Image: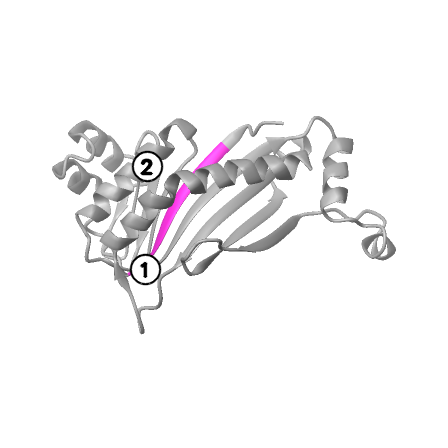
């Protein structure tokens, strides 16, 4: 079973300056062209203040808060493009303090019918010994598993399995999210600049995407 929808988000936590990272600044830096900037800035959901900047390009969306930067796309063909754009943005803002990073891959699967959908949930979270005794119709809504990192970075890998928010409930949609989380310290104790974070992002990009694809496939095949 292949996913119907694949989503990617790159999240950086630290001290951000939302007002800077707007479409016109991206165009000035030649990360996007002037037409893309103008189209993004004229959309109804465009926000650009000192507290929050929010805008959408044709292939991704951005939200920048005082302590969080998020770039998101639901177009698999643009995953690398989004990574490159994030790298360009923070390559120009290398001194931005960053304490955490997450590379998040989300997969949405559609089961053929209710029986196969329920059978998957029963395998993942058996109901016989406990839940059937508590209710006549228990169902799996959300399950999260933490996996230890196997590299030299601090952090964790979170695997979340639940009901899809992109496929209608009555069409048996499953969501699997793989959160590759890096912890670089705290703003009070230790931070690193965005330039160093980009090195971690780029060096681990392909292994992260491959791991997410393999893990989601293994879960639905189980």
Give the quarter of the figure containing the C terminus: top right
Say left or right for 153 vs 1.
Answer: left
The residue labelled by disc 1 is 67
- Residue 171 or residue 128, whichever sits in front: 128
Numbered range of the magenta stretch: 6-14
For marks 1 and 2 on the same chain, the one whose residue lies earlier in the sequence: 1
The residue labelled by disc 2 is 82
Residue at image point 26% right, 34% down: 40
When asked about the image quadrant of residue 196, the answer is bottom left
Image x and y of residue 149, in percent: 49, 55
Image x and y of residue 220, in percent: 65, 36
When asked about the image quadrant of residue 58, the answer is top left
Q: Secondary structure at mark 1?
A: loop
Specify whether residue 165 is in view.
no
Say left or right for 12 vs 150.
Answer: left
Q: Secondary structure at mark 2?
A: helix
Image x and y of residue 38, in percent: 20, 32
* Mark-to-mark CA distance, 1 and 2: 20 Å
């Amino acid at each position: 079973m292949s996913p119907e929808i694949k989503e990617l988000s790159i999240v950086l936590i630290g001290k951000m300056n939302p007002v800077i990272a707007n479409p016109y600044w991206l165009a000035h830096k030649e990360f996007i062209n002037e037409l893309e900037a103008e189209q993004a800035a004229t959309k109804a959901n465009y926000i650009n203040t000192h507290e929050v900047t929010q805008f959408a390009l044709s292939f991704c969306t951005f939200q920048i808060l005082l302590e969080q930067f998020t770039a998101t796309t639901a177009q698999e063909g643009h995953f690398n493009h989004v990574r490159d754009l994030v790298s360009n943005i923070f390559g120009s803002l290398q001194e931005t303090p960053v304490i955490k990073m997450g590379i998040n891959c989300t997969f949405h699967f559609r089961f053929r019918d209710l029986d196969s959908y329920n059978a998957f949930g029963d395998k993942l979270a058996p109901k016989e010994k406990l839940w059937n005794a508590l209710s006549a119709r228990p169902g799996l809504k959300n399950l999260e598993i933490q996996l230890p990192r196997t590299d030299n970075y601090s952090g964790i890998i979170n695997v979340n399995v639940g009901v899809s928010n992109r496929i209608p409930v009555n069409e048996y949609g499953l969501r699997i999210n793989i959160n590759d989380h890096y912890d670089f310290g705290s703003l009070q104790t230790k931070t690193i600049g965005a330039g160093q974070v980009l090195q971690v992002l780029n060096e681990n990009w392909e292994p992260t995407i491959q791991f997410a694809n393999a893990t989601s496939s293994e879960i639905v095949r189980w």
